[in-house]
Amino acid sequence: MKVFATKNISLYKVKKYLKETTGLIPVFYDMCENSCICYAGRYKSYQSCPICESTRLDARGKAKKIMPYLSIIDRLMIQYKDETRAKELLYRHEYNINKNDDNLDDIFDGKIYKELTKKDNLFKDKRDVAFTASCDGYQIFKQKTDDCWLFLIINNNLHPSLRVKKENLLVPFLIPGPNQPKDFNTFLRPFIDEMKELEKGITCYDARTKCEFLLHAHIITWTGDIPALTKIMNITGHNSYHGCRICNIEGVYSQKHKHIYFPPKQNCMNKDHSDWIGYINEIEAATTNKEKEILIRKYGIKGKSILFELSSIKFPRSFPIDIMHLFFENIAPQMFKLWSAHFFKDDDLNATPFAISKSSWDLIGILMQNNKKGMPLVFGRPPRNIFKHNAGYKAEEWANWITLYSVPLIKTFLPAKYVKGWNEFVTAVHLCMQSSISHDDKKIIEKKLSTFYKHIVKDYAKVDNKDRSNIFLISFHYLLHVAESIEDFGPCRGYWQFPMERMCGMLIPLVKSQLHPYANLWNNLVLYERFNLLKYNKEVCKYIFPQKEEKKWPSHIVFASPLYKEYEIYSPSKQYTLTQAELKKLKETYSAIYDINVNQIENFSPIVRKYGKLCKDGHIISSKWVTKDKIKNRNNYSVAINITVDKYAHFPNILPELEVKEIFGEIEYFIMHRFRYRTHFSGCINSHIISNDDNDTNDNDTNNNATAATTPTTAAAATATTSITAAAATPTISTTAAAAAATATRTLTKAAR
């Protein structure tokens, strides 16, 4: 403790103290200097590489190159010694016992997890841990000359709101570059050995129960892009005749394009675990290299992956479709190339009914550029001119292009059947991105993606009977397997690659040395991991992270109420007298909340405290009252509100029939008001009714100041969750309709009407 309390301490002492306190020490494994193999497992005693024949040691007797490894077991044991963390790690068990519907809300609702628990008898103890593993190759230099492979573990025993936070992501090891690893199995050996140890069980202390127990952990899924999974699964990859890892579709070689493509075929059967083992046995039984090469080409499998040693891995189902790479970094860019007449090398093939002219793309780009300010902050990055900057688009930008901007912007320039076909894909993407997917949603996703695939075949590849076989990339074929992955593992967000991409982005700034970049990266990564583990040592935390006294603000600057635990309203503020129209709306709101007649509300004070901002979970929602009209200011006050109303409210003799209506609006300001001895937060919203008719949206500004109040259970006038449904249906991008930043759900009774 003294070392952190002393001023002017050296970095060396800090590192030494972190090492001693956490006890987290990496292990180093010798590897080939050309990254061919790791000297582990069957190569442990080798003194030279069997592939490139380079020697293992230098003239001084030291390994020429090493692979660092950081124990998963050590970090789990440290976490279970903390009582708070031990309780957090019970999420998997609590989720399963409290589950009361058949929706797919988490990875534990998938068929794979259920099969592992019932058939394989895994996860018997409520503390057993379920991991998601991921790997990816990334470049640490801008020149993109060095390949570094990173491995990531996500702990699914944590709540979804915690599991992908940066401090909870576990990096067990990385494979240093600059060359691509050749025998991937050898580099995975230390990790697989540790996972096998966790399968058997390790003795661990549980601070929650104050006793030891046998901890088990299993990997239930492994994610990555196609090149990463090609190495992990030890298959031939997407450029081979059997490029699909899930089914037995066979590609066709195009003599014209010198490439293998995957046109649609009937009766493509999915492979299963037993099929995979049978194929491997055939390959291993081959007596000649030629016979082996024929079998490898026939099955698309190079050999046995080391992952077969883990009982929880089921080939190929344990390797689901990652929609981040498939939808956002493959399908969307390829469709843009088709529409912008850049997909085919032959200009004659680009002259199609679905090609949008350059002048039209210029107009689309200008619309996107001009609407930067109107796009709410919760949408993420502001839209960039897609025609100019598409080559630099990130996955998040392609996701926004698909779900928010594409349909309203291209529908004017594409024939109706192409807009309709694309809208099938857009609808499926919206459903795939939901945090909860019903079985009906899954069926819709399957149908929509199948319809979109058939649309590609009929209206793009065969539009004028010319040879456009190079449209049939493996990415379009993988659309047919997305619904299967959802059925096996639940919502796509549970196994997409965004956490891995985020981790890669976090690690790149840690590289400070150009002479020894990988050693520098690993040292900083170990330091980062040790620092994260300090919070599980309460004695240390008291001294290093002393609790600061909570600053108390006067109520006119920050106002909080015990009725609204997650919310605060912020200054600027002033005393304000409601207009008659606003007063009427507020009375109607209280009438709905308390189920009383509006006429019964008497002695109602029109004087309120007016505020400019609302804070929920650290996110600020602003209002028009305080927003300055500056060029760089983004929209942070538009909302979409789903209200439940009585369809027959104007017919008192008809039984009520509730329906959900969606309105859009702009928050004028927030208020604090006393009613029935309670303090209520409300928001005054200038609403706009949006009517949808045949996918056309008409914006009718009603100029109504609708005051949306909150109950202690709903707690806010507008919550910061993105609503993008209406934006995808609008014919033009408008600040009102396309900029729905938040969704507030209200239940209004007939009295409120």
Image (cartoon, rainbow, N blue to C red):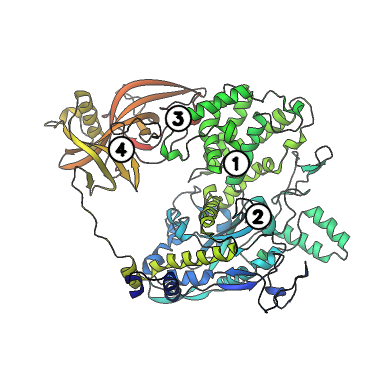
Amino acid type, callout 1: Phe
In the rendered view, would you say 211 is above or below 405?
Answer: below
Q: Are marks 1 and 2 in contact (CB under 8 Å)?
A: no
User: The N terminus is located in which quarter?
Assistant: bottom left
The residues bearing labels 2 and 3 have C-alpha atoms spaced at a distance of: 37 Å
Q: Residue at x 85, y 56 (%)?
A: 294
- Which residue position is annotated with label 4? 717
- CA distance separating discs 1 and 4: 34 Å
Residue under the image location 59 percent in, 23 percent down: 360
State if disc 4 and disc 1 touch (CB < 8 Å). no
Please tell me which residue is depicted at 30% across the width and 41% down the height of the picture: 614
Nearer to us of marks 4 and 3 is: 3
Q: Which residue is mark 2?
A: 228
- Front position among marks 1 and 2: 2
Asked whether residue 345 appears in the rendered view, the answer is yes
- Crowdedness near tag 3: few (<14), some (14–19) or many (≥20) residues, C-alpha within 10 Å: many
Residue receiving disc 1: 327
